[in-house]
Image (spheres, rainbow, N blue to C red):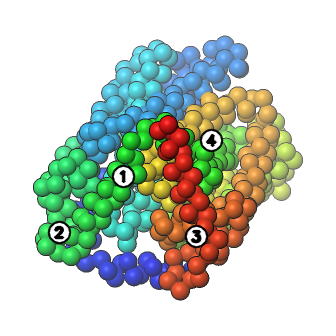
Amino acid sequence: MMKLSYFQTAALNETPKEVLNWRLYWSTFVFGILGASRGLDEGLVGGMVSLKSFSTEFGMKVGSEDEQENRKSNITSMVQLGSIVGALLAFLLCDRIGRIRSLQTLCILWLVGFIIVITSHGSVGQIIAGRFIAGLGIGMTVVVGPTYIGETAPRAVRGMLTNIFAGSVYLGVMIAYFSNWGASLHISNSSRMQWVAPQTAHIGFAGLFLIMSFTLNESPRYLVMRGKHDEAIKAITTLRQLPIEHPFVQEELAGIRDQLEREREATHGVSRVGKLRELVMVPANRYRLMLGLLSQLLGQWSGASAITIYAVDFFGVLGYTGQSEKLFATCILGIVKLSAAYLCAFFIVDFLGRRKSLYAGISLQAASILYVAIFLGVVGSERLETGDLSPSQRRAAVGAVSALYISGVGWAMGWNSFQYLVNADIWPLRLRALGASLVMCVHFVNQFGNTKAVPLMLLAMTPFGFFLFCGAVCLMGLAWVWFFVPEMAGRSLESMDELFALPWWQIGRHGHRLTGGDHPDAPRNLFADEKVADIEHEERAVEHNRAS
């Protein structure tokens, strides 16, 4: 704890006060709030398919139960499917056309997609196509937003500003929940505007981001990378509000050029296939990849995303009968998740560290979800549907609804923060783009599978079985964190290499202690130093074999 505070305070003390100016916060606001795009869809789509006006127009109650749930999951999951392609598209476009142009591109895709959605009069095919196109743009946000913030934020506040993106997902969720609730109260069930009006929030946000993009400066790092040095100097002096002669600006420019030079040397002559081979053949990189992939797999199937998207259905399972009553309950969930996301991101994650906050968050989430499972198993869905509950069962039902809210707090403290921070923490320079892109593609693959499967799981497993499954995943996540996740907060790239050079069975449980973190008085771990040298030798061997 003291080590973390020491380095954060030192970095902030070395940062001139002019650097923390309105231009920095404005650009961070635009790219940080971009995360609301995902939250908007996660919150809106579950309410949309539950509204009577939408159900009537698109025949959601036509056919067998399996056919109905299939139709519902196809519509709700299509943005996630488009987002898989969008994350890869952003990986290709960001370095070709720049961060600002990539932002404008995703806004246009997002805008066009939802114009297609709201004009789909009764056509399920058109609404699916529109949601897929919008998903291309929304999927790009998870690459474009954190990349720009990471490149423009001073190191003293980089972690805090990056967490704005993670928390803004729940700003979108909250706005979406209130939009659905308001539409159910004030617009007739017989009018298609009941489901169309909330969806126009997507068009408003996409159009607003598109307009705001013209007020921003391009990332200085991107400009240096493209050889536009004069434009880079102008961008960085504007962003930092310091003259070019200032030591802080000179040091930052020198750092950007040095980093790019080292990156070019590291990747010179190495194809994408060569990088992929290095990613899976070097043990230290395989461990990094395992951390990234399993954090997405376990996090997405822990139940939090399903609860966000299908919140209306889950509150119905727990005894809420009226449509407005269920939608209002989702509004409270949105407020809880938004508040928890920012409180945890700004005050808890850095205070406890990555490992402890993840462990505490999953524990809270597991306990609350298992309570819901036990409640449903004891009381039974049939009794909840009829409302024939004893006084003690009614009190237990209130507890189950509260547990659903508490699970959102646990998610915000644990998986939600970690799934973005892990990409920023673990990757070496030459593998960062490839590794982060693969991990975020797996993020959307799991979210697509989760969104598609949940309606059918609720039908086949019953709500009791579904919550029991999510609780089991949370317990598996706890065991995984205890064995495999090291503390990574406050570490430099060099010390991260030393950490992952340890034998795999030591990295998670003892890695931070054995390598001493970044404290200047920490003892050197000679075994880890030797392993770093071995890894560098293996990497050279991989490149030599590729060349041969």
Report the residue marked by disc 1: 265
Say which element carries label 2: loop
Q: Earlier in the sequence, mark 1 or mark 2?
A: 2
Instruction: Give left or right: position of 233 versus 167.
Output: left
Say which element carries label 3: helix
Report the residue marked by disc 3: 529
Q: CB under 8 Å between callouts 4 and 2?
A: no
Instruction: Report how far apart the C-alphas of labels 3 and 4 lie in the structure.
Output: 44 Å
Q: CB under 8 Å between callouts 1 and 4?
A: no
Report the residue marked by disc 4: 306
Vertical order, 179 against 111 (above or below): below
Residue at image position (78%, 29%) is 460
Q: Which of 322 and 164 is in front in this view?
A: 164
Q: Which of marks 3 and 4 is nearer the N terminus?
A: 4
> Can the viewer see residue 512 in this picture?
no
Instruction: Give left or right: position of 38 versus 71.
Output: left
Which mark is in front, 1 or 2?
Answer: 1
Query: Which amino acid, by three-letter code, is at mark 1?
Result: Glu
